[in-house]
Image (cartoon, rainbow, N blue to C red):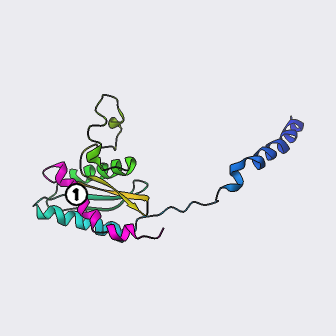
């Protein structure tokens, strides 16, 4: 048994060394990240836009891994707005699309729309910087999904120039 294992060792080494992608790949991957300060600006601008329409909302800004970076709930917004805003942000980030464009995409029973954490309702917007998705913003609590999305867009617009000019 030991002889067989020793006989395979050079063969395995030769295979790994001969694999073309092994030498050409970097040893680390640089992943752009959304700063907490930028996420705060997005969330605050979205909240303020909804207040203009007298809507009390919850806003969640997530990073590219789907983890909340900033979560805001206006004074009178129900707790439920936080869970919904998070799911909208997660869905927008996962599909790299505004959730309003996904609303009718998964309507059949047992479709991907039934996966926990995904919510195909307007109010989620992906966030990109220099061509890389860095997260998403989700808003919940306005009188309509269109209102939620308007507020999410206002949040994104507050930092859009900075995102587009980010040298990644």
Q: Position of residue 83 (x, y in %)?
A: 27, 50
Q: Is residue 124 visible?
A: yes
Query: Which type of secondary structure does the marked residue at label 1 adopt?
Result: strand
Query: Nearest the camera: 166 or 59?
Result: 166
Say above or below: 113 vs 163.
Answer: above
Identify the residue position indicated by label 1 in the image. Answer: 58
Specify whether 51 is left or right of 45. Answer: left
Q: Is residue 140 visible?
A: no
In the rendered image, residue 146 lying in the magenta stretch gets the answer: yes
Query: Nearest the camera: 18 or 63?
Result: 18
Main secondary structure along the magenta-highlighted residues: helix
Write down the quadrant of residue 56 in the picture: bottom left
For the point 38% across and 50% down, the residue is 96
Q: Position of residue 85 (x, y in %)?
A: 26, 53
Q: Position of residue 115 (x, y in %)?
A: 36, 38
For the point 80% across and 47% down, the residue is 13
In the rendered image, residue 129 lying in the magenta stretch gets the answer: no
Q: Residue furthest top?
A: 109
For the point 20% across and 63% down, the residue is 47
Task: Give the magenta part as a residue range.
Answer: 141-168
Say above or below: 115 vs 146.
Answer: above
Query: Nearest the camera: 2 or 160?
Result: 160
Specify whether 121 is left or right of 163. Answer: left
Q: Residue furthest left?
A: 54
For the point 68% across and 50% down, the residue is 21
């Amino acid at each position: 048994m030991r002889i067989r294992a020793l006989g395979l060792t050079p063969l395995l080494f030769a295979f790994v060394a001969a694999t073309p992608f092994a030498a050409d790949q970097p040893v680390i991957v640089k992943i752009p990240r959304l700063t907490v300060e930028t996420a705060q600006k997005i969330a605050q601008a979205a909240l303020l836009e909804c207040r203009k329409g007298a809507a009390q909302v919850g806003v969640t800004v997530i990073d590219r891994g789907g983890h909340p970076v900033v979560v805001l709930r206006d004074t009178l917004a129900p707790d439920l707005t936080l869970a919904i805003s998070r799911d909208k942000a997660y869905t927008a980030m996962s599909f790299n699309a505004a959730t309003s464009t996904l609303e009718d995409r998964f309507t059949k029973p047992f479709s991907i729309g039934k996966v926990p954490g995904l919510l195909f309702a307007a109010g989620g917007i992906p966030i990109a910087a220099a061509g890389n998705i860095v997260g998403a913003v989700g808003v919940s609590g306005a009188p309509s999904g269109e209102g939620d999305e308007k507020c999410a867009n206002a949040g994104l617009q507050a930092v859009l120039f900075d995102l587009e000019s980010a040298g990644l």
